[in-house]
Image: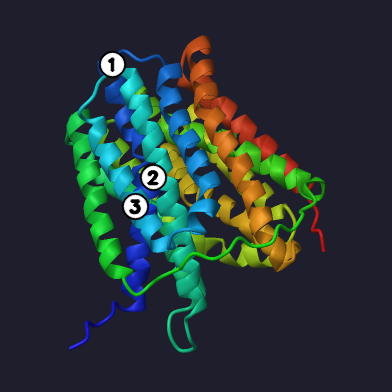
Amino acid sequence: MARSEPSTALTTLALALAAAVSLGMARFSYGLLLPAMKADLGWSYLVAGAMNTVNAAGYLAGALAMPALLRRFDARAVMLAGALIAAAALAAHGAVRSDGALLALRLIAGLGSAGSFVGGGLLAARLAGRLGPGGLKPGFVLAGYYGGTGLGIVGSALVVPPLDWPQAWWALGAACAAATAFTAWGTRSLHAPPTPGAARVPVRHRQMAWMLAGYTMFGLGYIGYMTFIVSLLREQGLAPAWVTAFFVLLGLGCVASSWLWAGVLQRWRGGQTLALLNGLLAVATLLPVLSTAPVPVFVSGLMFGGVFLSVVASTTAFVRHNLPPAAWPAGIAAFTIVFAAGQVVGPVLVGLVADARGGLLGGLALSAAILGLGAVFGSRQRALV
C-alpha cells in the first residue's frame, strides 16, 4: 500500500515549524536567555549585543549563499540541513562559556537558520502555487509559514524560564531537532529541485531608495527591541511570570500578523505600508521605556508582535506591485541585504548606548527614534508604476 501523504494543512504546519526553528528559536530566544547569561558571564551590553550581531551576520552570509546552493541542491534538503545545523549549534551553546566559542556558535546558528528560512519559504511558495479551487487558499499557506516564527517565540517562552541558561540551550536544541523531524515528515511530498540561475535583470535601486532606506531603519531598530526587551523588563523588576506572559503574547501577535495586514499589503502600492508599520513599531518600542507597568508592557508586546513580520512582507508586496516578475529576485535581494545589514549593526549600537548612557532605556529610546525615521523614509516612497 502506498504511503498516504500529509494533508495541505499538516504540510503548512510542518513548514511553519521550519520558520519557528530558524527565527523564533535560533534568533529570538536569545533575548530570554540574555539576562541570566549577562549576569553569569559578566558581559557588558556591548558584548551582549555582539552575540546577536554575529547571529545576524551569519544569517546575512547564509542568505547571500542561498542562490548558489539552490542551484545545486533541492530546497527541501537545504531547509532540513539548515534546521539541523541550527539545532546542533543551539544545543552546543549550553556546553561552552567562553565569549569566543559562543560568538562562533551564534554565527553558525545564523548560517543554519538562513538555509532553513529561505528553503522553507521557497517550498511554501511552491505549495501555495499548486493549490486548486475549493481547498486552502494560497494566502493561508504563506501566512501560516511566516506566522511560524511566532510559534517559535511562544515555544521559547515556555521552554526557557524554568531552566538555567545551559539547560535552556540544550532544551531549545532538542525542541528544534523534534520540530525538524516533524518538518521532514510533513514535507516529504514537497520538492524544489535545483534550477539554472535566472537571467540577471537590472533593478533601478535609486527609484526605490526611500523604501530601501526605511527598511534599513527597520532592521536597525527592531532587532534592538527583540534582543534587549526581556533584559529591560527584568531590570525594571517585572515578575518572571509576567515576562513569560509578555513573550508569549508577542509570539501570538506574530502568528496573527500575516492575516491582520493582508488587505493593507494588497491595497497600497508605495511606501505607505512600510511607513505605517514602522510608526507602530516605534510606538511599541517606546511604551516600555515610558512605563514598565503591566498594561503598557503588554500593549507593547502585542503591538510589536502583530506588526514586525509584516514589515518584511511589505517589501515583498512592494516588489510584486512595482517590478516586472523577472526583476523580483533582484528586488527582493536588495531588500534582504539592507535589512540584514541593519540587523548586524542594531544590537551593538543599542549595547553601546546602554553602556555609555546608563542603561537600556536610552538604547531602546534610540531604537524607537530609528524606527520613527524609517516611517518618515517610507512615507516618501511613491509607487513606481
Sooner in the amino-acid sequence: mark 1 or mark 2: 1
Q: Which mark is residue 112?
A: 2
Residue type indicated by callout 2:
Gly
Residue 376, image x, y percentages:
73, 40
In which image quadrant can residue 343 be found?
top right
Q: Comparing marks 1 and 2, which lies closer to the viewer? A: 2
Relative side of 281 to 178, left or right: right
Residue 368, image x, y percentages:
58, 32
| Cβ atoms at labels 3 and 2 below 8 Å apart | yes
Rendered position, 284 above or below 67: above
Sooner in the amino-acid sequence: mark 3 or mark 1: 1
SS for dot 2: helix
What residue would you read off at disc 1? Answer: 41
Q: Distance between the residues labelled 3 and 2?
A: 7 Å
Residue type indicated by callout 3:
Ala
What residue would you read off at disc 3? Answer: 81
Residue type indicated by callout 1:
Leu
Sooner in the amino-acid sequence: mark 3 or mark 2: 3
